[in-house]
Amino acid sequence: MKILLAAPSVDTCYEYVSALGLMNLHLIGKELGCDMELIDLSTYSYKKGLAQILSRQYDLIGISCNFTNAAPYCMRYAKDIKEKYPDTIVISGGNHATLAPEDLLLNSYDYIIYGEGEASFKEFLHRHLNKQSVKDLKGLYYLEDGKIVKNPPREPIEDLDTLPFNDYSEFNLKPYFKWAKMRYINIETSRGCIYNCAFCATVKMWGHRYRHKSPKRILDEFKVAKRNGCDFVFLCDDDTAIDEQNLRNLCELLIKEKIILPWGTTIGSRSVRDESTLDLMAQSGCVKINICIESANPRILKEYRKPYAIEDNRRMCANLLKKGIVVHNHGIIGFPNETFRETLKTYFYLIKTSPIWHISILEPRPGTDYWENWDKKGDFSQYRLFGKANVILSRRKYSNYLIYRLFALYYFLNPRRIWNALFHKNKAVRYSYWIQYYVAYRTIKANFLSSFRN
């Protein structure tokens, strides 16, 4: 069975990093004896990406649809694939596919594997290889008589150590290394979240129950990174410190085994209770932490259902900086009735607490409270605006946009940030500053091209 897995073209890309989920599926297909191919089209134009897909005939093509601004491309791929190869099975998965399946199923996709996909994908392939029906497969959407059928959900994978172990021997990482100007990989160490923030769809995608890999398994993945000569490892979790003891055990193992690589991750403001955990993180190589306070206004934090307080964030940022760990703080503006003063308060708070920070404008992302009430669902021209600070729910649309751009200018023209983005002695820290400039460039470029198209 010839199978192609593809990460689609997308207008904006926060980082150009390997698609861990697709790599898992590639390894699963390989174990079952399938002829597997994986391509990353995220930096390609649609035309170039389509030519790559159509260059060979496959039995099955899987296109991930994580980002809403990639969804219009995903829908076009399926139609064009079916036009040339009508018998090819086209499937999808990922955040947008899971939470807005009608966008894809009504545009030529045969199936969507929703939520956590590895176990469902494995059974999906096993049944096809044995010429068995998949219509009762858990974790599957499909179309029947013009109506979307949603099968019961797949049980979450309890032991994440059972996921395929990726030593990257199957994949070419050179394009990613060249792009980042250093050897950099992501590692997933956990899934699920115990919180339920109003703007986030993590719980809808991965479930409420927090699950994590064992410290030994993560250590083995760090060893792979070291063998690959990596300069930086990012643990791409929503909050790596929800199980603080597991994080401590990992840090102690890294120190004991002398696998000290620069690494970073995201943690919640209240997740680390013992300050000595931060010492262990620094000793084990941690150089950067993302903190997501979202707003400096208690009223809005309550609306967002954030489980942290302003003081929790201030204390965490101060403690991390004291340990020599760079803080990257994240905020959101554009809550529907947010005042001008509240917006400014968030900006000034981020400036005060962290050397690297960025602001997003609140978007109605699929699976969130705001998606349900958004009146432009299904308008694919609106989907293209996602990820570029152009979808604004607030009544103060123009002032929000103006403030966003003015503070971006303030951020990017800061001489110290420019210096760190170009010359910081630590490659990982330099990258952490540089990537902000890259995101701004891609956003401006996408906005310009969008205006030109219109």
Image: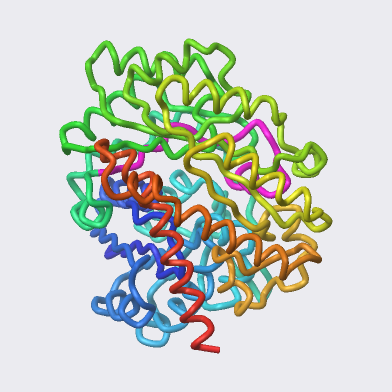
**Residue at the limit of the structure toward the front, as seen here:** 415
Count of numbered circles in the view:
0
Residue 356: x and y in percent read 48, 42
Query: Residue 199 colored magenta?
Result: yes
Q: Quadrant of the N terminus?
A: bottom left
Q: Give 119 or 335, whichever is nearer the viewer.
A: 335
Q: Colour scheme of this structure image? A: rainbow
Which residue is painted at 30% across and 71% down in the image?
A: 58
Residue 285: x and y in percent read 32, 24
Q: Give 313 or 221, whichever is nearer the viewer.
A: 313
Q: Give 136 or 242, whichever is nearer the viewer.
A: 242
Query: Residue 174 colored magenta?
Result: no
Boundaries of the magenta span = 184-205
Residue 446: x and y in percent read 47, 74
Q: Quadrant of the C terminus?
A: bottom right
Q: Is residue 141 visible?
A: no
Which residue is painted at 37% across and 27% down in the image?
A: 286
In the image, taking residue 9 as reference, residue 300 lies left or right, namely right
Q: Give 418 or 169, whichever is nearer the viewer.
A: 418
The image shows residue 378, relative to residue 314, as above or below, that is: below
Q: Is residue 372 visible?
A: yes
The image shows residue 258, relative to residue 200, as above or below, that is: above
Which residue is painted at 43% across and 61% down in the image?
A: 13
The image shows residue 452, relative to residue 59, as above or below, that is: below
In the image, taking residue 242 as reference, residue 88 lies left or right, namely left
Which residue is painted at 75% across and 57% down in the image?
A: 370
Residue 280: x and y in percent read 40, 14
